[in-house]
Amino acid sequence: MTFHADQDLEELEGLPDLVLDTSHAAVAEHDLVEVRRRFDGRIRHVHLSDNAGKGWDSHLPPGEGVLPLGAFLDDLSSE
């Protein structure tokens, strides 16, 4: 199941496999590191993209938006 921008995190509890789209999570105003830690062990794929921070899903190349992708990747690689 893919995390959608308007999805409540509680809806994802109990699902065994998840895809984390960083831009979708940002539009929903979720902290990327917190989402990753909450669903650790169930995230099977990360759709890594940046976001312009204007309230919609912009899927910018990493480094061209406002998301803290460096901190997210540092946390991801620390596992």
Image (spheres, rainbow, N blue to C red):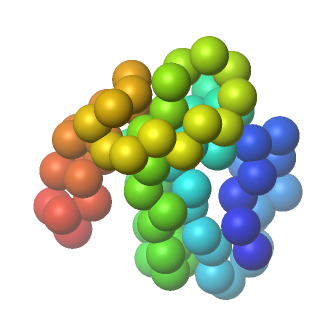
Number of numbered markers? 0
For residue 13, above or below residue 59? below
Of the 4 image quadrants, the one containing the N terminus is bottom right
Determine which quarter of the picture holds residue 58.
top right
Residue for point 70% across, 58% down:
3
| Residue at the spot 50% in from the left edge and 33% down from the top edge | 51
Q: Residue 14 at x, y = what percent?
A: 75, 73
Q: Residue furthest top?
A: 54
Q: In this rendering, is residue 25 above or below 15?
A: above
Viewer-closest of 7 and 23: 23
Tell me, yes or no, if residue 32 can be seen here.
Answer: no
Q: Residue at x 62, y 16 (%)?
A: 54
User: Which quadrant holds the C terminus?
Assistant: bottom left
Toward which corner of the image does residue 48 lie, by quadrant? bottom left
Q: Is residue 1 left or right of residue 11?
A: left
Q: 36 left or right of 15? A: left
Q: Residue at x 50, y 24 (%)?
A: 52
**Quadrant assignment, res 66:** top left
The answer to whether one can see residue 29 in this image is yes
User: 76 or 22, which lies in front?
Assistant: 22
Residue 53, given in percent of the width and then of the height, sits at: 54, 20
* Side (left or right) of 11 relative to 15: right
Say if 61 sits above or below 40 in the image. above
- Residue 6 at x, y = what percent? 83, 40
Q: Position of residue 57 (x, y in %)?
A: 66, 37
